[in-house]
Amino acid sequence: MTSAIELEDVVKEYHAHGELVRAVKGVSLDIEEGEFFSLLGPSGCGKTTTMRMIAGFEAPSKGLVKLHGQDVTNVPPNKRDVNMVFQSYALFPHMSVWDNVAFGLKQRKTPQEEIRRRVGDILEIVDLVGREKRRPREMSGGQQQRVALARALVNRPRALLLDEPLGALDLKLRQAMQIELKRIQREVGITFVYVTHDQNEALTMSDRIAVMNDGLVEQLGGPREIYERPATPFVAGFIGTSNLLTGTARAGELKIGDGRVLVPGQDGEVTVTVRPEKITIGTDAPEAGLSALAGTVSEVVYLGTYNSYAVRLADGAEMTVFQQNAHDATATAERGDSVWLSWQAQHSYVIGS
Ligand code: ATP
């Protein structure tokens, strides 16, 4: 099957004030038809530039952009079968919801009857039936975002590009809209490419995620794969909270102070990541067959459903541990306590293995 969107070794360089800025340093991607695909990374990593090259607002300095198998590298945005939704919504303030959504179809002289049907259908999908006559300013941020989405979708683009579309919303509304967006995408079956710096957002919605750092894709994979098997220390640190341990493994074991980290099958220099929720905190030395590190609790933060512990190891490194709060539980450890951390061998993930 032909991919919806392909980038082949795309580079984007800017010359700004006599300086060369390499915003994108060689990105290759293959986005499938109907996929919810996210570009995720910190500010300045090149995700917006990558998206703008897919849309055609920027021309790559090198490399190719293909849409549905066709080279569009030099095709202007309005001739590409993609639409873009921005954080700022860009709605017409003096027009009603209905007119905002119908605008593009009217411009293209679509027959009245078809406009009525298509606008009606899309307003139903984004759950705005009954609000057709409102103006944007009479609506909440989440509703305005849905109008912007409806306006982009009503043209039936083959791909929709979304650049931090939920960035202006508060956390609760943003989380609700994430679920909504995913539902809408599934319903319309259009390829979505979504730019975000919010890892939870990417994990919640995406079929696949490209994690970008400094103009390059560090890892490409499904949410679970990226969370559980980070390819680089950067990905491990950027997605969720993780503990990184480095050292020389001998016969599947990494010695750290009096403790051990089990890394079955490994020998030589390793970087290991272990997620905070996989670690158990206790006062007794763990049994053989578990990874075990001794330390002192330096911080306990109560977070409702779980506690977050900071534990300082003998070598000064700090580990983060999340422990679920059972309904009758009191904190298992307090600040200043000497504790043992333990976890099963399978939860030590050796980066790059
Ligand atoms: P953010 O989340 O902050 O928008 P981003 O990952 O989307 O970040 P880009 O906007 O793609 O990052 O920018 C990548 C790099 O390219 C940055 O260092 C930025 O300063 C630079 N850059 C982007 N556009 C231009 C331009 N028109 N001229 C010069 N430099 C640019």
Image (tube, rainbow, N blue to C red):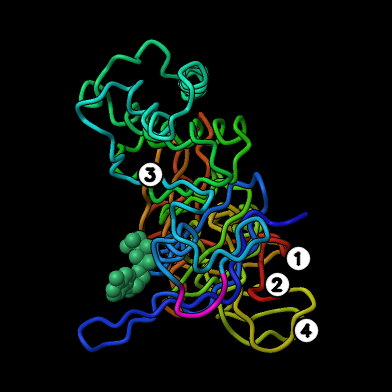
Q: For the residue marked with disc 3, what is the amino acid?
A: Pro
Q: Given contact means CB atoms under 8 Å apart, are the residues at marks 4 and 1 in contact?
A: no
The answer to whether the residue bearing label 2 lies less than 8 angstroms from the nearest atom of ligand 1 is no
Counting residues from the start of the chain, the first of labels 1 and 2 encountered is: 2
Count neighbours of disc 3 (C-alpha within 10 A) and say few if under 14, some if 14 to 19, many if 20 or more. many
Counting residues from the start of the chain, the first of labels 2 and 3 encountered is: 3
Disc 3 secondary structure class:
loop
Q: Given contact means CB atoms under 8 Å apart, are the residues at marks 1 and 2 in contact?
A: yes
Of the residues tagged 4 and 1, which is closer to the observer?
A: 4
In the figure, 39 relative to 263: above or below?
above
What are the residue bounds of the magenta stretch? 60-64
Q: For the residue marked with disc 2, what is the amino acid?
A: Leu
The residue labelled by disc 4 is 251
Horizontal side of 168 relative to 308 (left or right) equals left
Count neighbours of disc 1 (C-alpha within 10 A) and say few if under 14, some if 14 to 19, many if 20 or more. few
Residue at the outermost top position: 130
The answer to whether the residue bearing label 1 lies less than 8 angstroms from the nearest atom of ligand 1 is no
Percent x, y of residue 336: 37, 60
Count neighbours of disc 2 (C-alpha within 10 A) and say few if under 14, some if 14 to 19, many if 20 or more. many
| Numbered tag placed on residue 262 in the rendering | 2
Of the residues tagged 1 and 2, which is closer to the observer?
A: 2
In the figure, 78 relative to 328: above or below?
below
The residue labelled by disc 1 is 289
